[in-house]
Image (tube, rainbow, N blue to C red):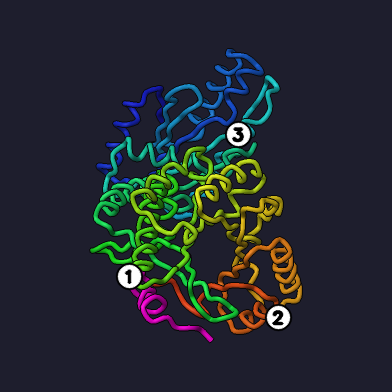
């Protein structure tokens, strides 16, 4: 058993282990929870005694050829032997946490709780600072870190580092934008009265020349996380404007396309200036452009909604509320008369035989009619729902029952050059 206050020393121990048999060890990042609050309540001297007490408890816990270092304040590293299977690691960490929690307390300060990040060492000998980062990040980003009790995460078992994934994606996203790998995709909105398609929702697809189609679920969170979502949205908005204008000039056809407004744009006071600049470079018929505001981002932000909606509609575009019924419903935003369209979320179309579901849909559509709003039902996949929505007087539907999202070229062939109607 060895222990010392020195990062260089434990780094050397780590490198020594990696040269021998790293698969026997895990690196643990440990911090005492709420240590700053403890210092504030009981004073610096009591805090120093607590640090020493935790360190002594760790020393008494670790065994032969295991190592610990108190690096600074409430932060410790440990190198201990634990087989790399989930159950064994969990049992080890649980026992260790309980030992720290229940260690002798002569001063009456109460239980001590800790946060732990566990990084199982690998045969490829990850360098010490990367391993330390891996242990630190899964400890720091544990969902339970705010709770009073101890918490832990195990790197690559219970925690996967999205930061690295997002960073890697970021390096690919910028050149993808420059090379035009982000494509505009359109999902038709079918007029339930006529069967015609003169409206669509703009969606983004990333088609890498080597990897092919990259799932939206993989890259969209990265776009939001690193702030590049706005770059992609503006890029697609320019394509939308050019496409709308081309169809008008070339075929005399007015197609109305809705674009989604992301949360970062919604919360930025001057976001619409960027859209106006893109529009001025790519002018088109303004009433063919609609902005969809996600219900989840406008909840309890009536004043901000009014500012955003007013800016958009005063310029000549229209606005809709998207995903109504997705779980956040705030009907107060519908008071704004400039919001002209209401999209009913796909989550309300799960069981066409559910009478409670049907009752809710009926009242949403009835409310929209009384507010003189256009209704769009999304995620429609069965004829039963189509017939029910026709009966209620819903205006449009989008979903796989009629059409999946498609390329601009396919949309043009089906609905612009030689328009077809849906039964």
> Horizontal and vertical percent for residue 185?
39, 66
Q: Closer to the camera: disc 1 or disc 2?
A: 1
| Residue positioned 45% across, 68% down in the render | 255
Does dot 2 land on a helix, a strand or a loop? Answer: loop
* Quadrant location, the C terminus: bottom right
Quick one: label 1 or label 2, which is nearer the N terminus? Answer: 1
Which residue corresponds to mark 1?
A: 250
Quarter where residue 10 is shown: top left
Q: Which dot marks residue 113?
A: 3
Find residue 23 and report its horizontal and vertical position in percent. Answer: 34, 49
| Start-end of magenta stretch | 407-423
State the separation of the CA atoms marked 3 and 2: 50 Å
Instruction: Point out the frontmost of discs 1 and 3.
Output: 1
**Coordinates of residue 327 in the picture (x, y in percent):** 66, 58
Badge number at residue 353? 2
Can residue 88 be seen from the camera position used here? no
Left or right: where 406 falls relative to 93: left
In the picture, measured across the screen, residue 272 lies left or right of residue 386, that is: left
Distance (Cα) linking label 1 and label 3: 69 Å
Spatial CA span between label 1 and label 2: 45 Å
Label 2: few (<14), some (14–19) or many (≥20) C-alpha neighbours in 10 Å? few
* Label 3 residue SS: loop
């Amino acid at each position: 058993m060895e222990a010392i206050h020195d990062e260089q020393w434990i780094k050397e121990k780590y490198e020594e282990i990696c040269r021998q048999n790293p698969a026997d060890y895990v690196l643990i990042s440990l911090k005492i929870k709420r240590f700053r609050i403890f210092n504030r309540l009981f004073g610096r001297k009591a805090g120093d005694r607590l640090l020493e007490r935790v360190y002594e408890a760790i020393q008494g816990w670790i065994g032969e050829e295991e190592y610990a270092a108190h690096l600074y304040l409430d932060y410790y590293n440990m190198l201990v032997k634990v087989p790399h299977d989930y159950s064994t690691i969990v049992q080890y960490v649980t026992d260790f946490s309980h030992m720290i929690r229940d260690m002798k307390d002569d001063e009456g300060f109460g239980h001590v709780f800790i946060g732990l990040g566990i990084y199982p060492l690998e045969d490829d000998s990850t360098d010490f600072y990367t391993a330390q980062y891996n242990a630190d990040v899964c400890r720091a980003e544990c969902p339970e870190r705010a709770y009073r009790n101890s918490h832990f995460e195990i790197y690559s078992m219970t925690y996967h580092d999205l930061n690295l994934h997002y960073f890697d994606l970021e390096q690919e996203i910028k050149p993808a934008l420059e090379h035009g790998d982000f494509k505009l995709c359109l999902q038709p909105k079918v007029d339930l009265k006529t069967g015609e398609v003169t409206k669509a929702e703009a969606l983004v697809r990333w088609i890498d020349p080597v990897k092919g189609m990259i799932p939206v679920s993989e890259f969209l969170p990265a776009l939001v996380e690193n702030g590049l979502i706005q770059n992609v949205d503006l890029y697609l908005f320019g394509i939308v404007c050019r496409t709308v204008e081309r169809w008008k000039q070339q075929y005399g056809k007015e197609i109305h396309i809705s674009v989604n407004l992301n949360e970062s744009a919604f919360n930025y006071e001057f976001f619409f200036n960027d859209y106006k600049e893109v529009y001025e470079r790519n002018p088109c018929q303004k009433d063919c452009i609609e902005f969809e505001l996600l219900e989840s981002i406008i909840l309890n932000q009536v004043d901000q909604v009014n500012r955003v909606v007013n800016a958009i509609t005063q310029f000549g575009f229209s606005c809709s509320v998207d995903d109504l019924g997705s779980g956040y419903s705030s009907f107060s935003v519908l008071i704004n008369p400039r919001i002209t369209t209401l999209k009913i979320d796909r989550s309300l179309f799960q069981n066409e035989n559910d009478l409670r579901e049907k009752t809710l849909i009926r009242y949403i559509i009835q409310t929209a009619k009384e507010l003189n709003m256009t209704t769009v039902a999304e995620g429609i996949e069965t004829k039963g729902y189509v017939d029910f929505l026709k009966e209620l007087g819903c205006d449009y539907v989008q979903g796989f029952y009629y059409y999946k999202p498609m390329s601009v070229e396919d949309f043009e062939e089906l609905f612009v050059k030689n328009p077809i109607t849906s039964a």
